[in-house]
Amino acid sequence: MRDYDRSADTLKIWEMSLAGASSREIETELGFKFAKINSALRRGRESQVLPPPPKKAISHVRHHKNYLRLGSISAVLEALTNEQVDWLATQTRQLECETVAEFIVEVVRDAHAIDNS
């Protein structure tokens, strides 16, 4: 483990997290920037000092209890090759979608309709 992983500030953040404090509560209590807290929590999880974050329902609004991590569009793009990103951009524009997220919605709707026909 790196030296910075065990700084006094990091240990305070980990201790509060293990006691059940949220990132925002830690921010208020210790006066650290939110990014510093999240970075320390990530390192704590990576080094298995902290448990992984709880899985949240994919949709709180509709009360679906699929418990998937949501991820991000950035993570999707990082997992694709340049050629695949170019294809995605072209397809997104052809469908006249304003965002990649909107395109993904259309892909899921189409796949769902095919699956249920």
Image (spheres, rainbow, N blue to C red):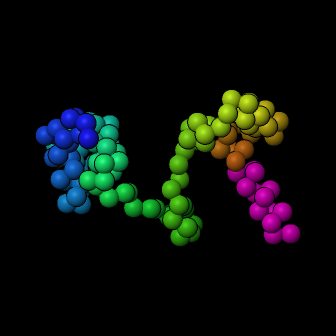
Q: Is residue 87 visible?
A: yes
Asked where in the image residue 81 lies, by quadrant, the reply is top right
Q: x and y percent of residue 108 in the render?
A: 73, 55
Residue extending farthest to the front is: 1
Quarter of the image with the C terminus is bottom right
All told, the count of numbered labels is 0
Which is more toward the observer, 74 or 61?
Answer: 74
Does 65 appear above or below 87? below
Which is more toward the observer, 81 or 98?
Answer: 81
In the image: residue 70, left or right of residue 89: left
Which is more toward the observer, 68 or 27?
Answer: 68
Look at the magenta stretch and give its main secondary structure: helix
Q: For residue 106: magenta? A: yes
Does 89 appear above or below 21? above
Q: x and y percent of residue 19 in the render?
A: 19, 60
Q: Which residue is at 53% across, 70% downward?
A: 65
Q: x and y percent of residue 111 in the render?
A: 78, 58
Q: Which residue is at 65% across, 44% downward?
A: 101
Asked where in the image residue 114 lies, by quadrant, the reply is bottom right
Residue extending farthest to the right is: 117
The boundaries of the magenta stretch are: 105-117
Q: x and y percent of residue 28 in the render?
A: 20, 45
Q: Which residue is at 17% across, 53% downward?
A: 15
Quarter of the image with the N terminus is top left
In the image: residue 50, left or right of residue 9: right
In the image: residue 66, left or right of residue 37: right
Q: Is residue 22 visible?
A: no
Does 91 appear above or below 44? above
Q: For residue 78: magenta? A: no
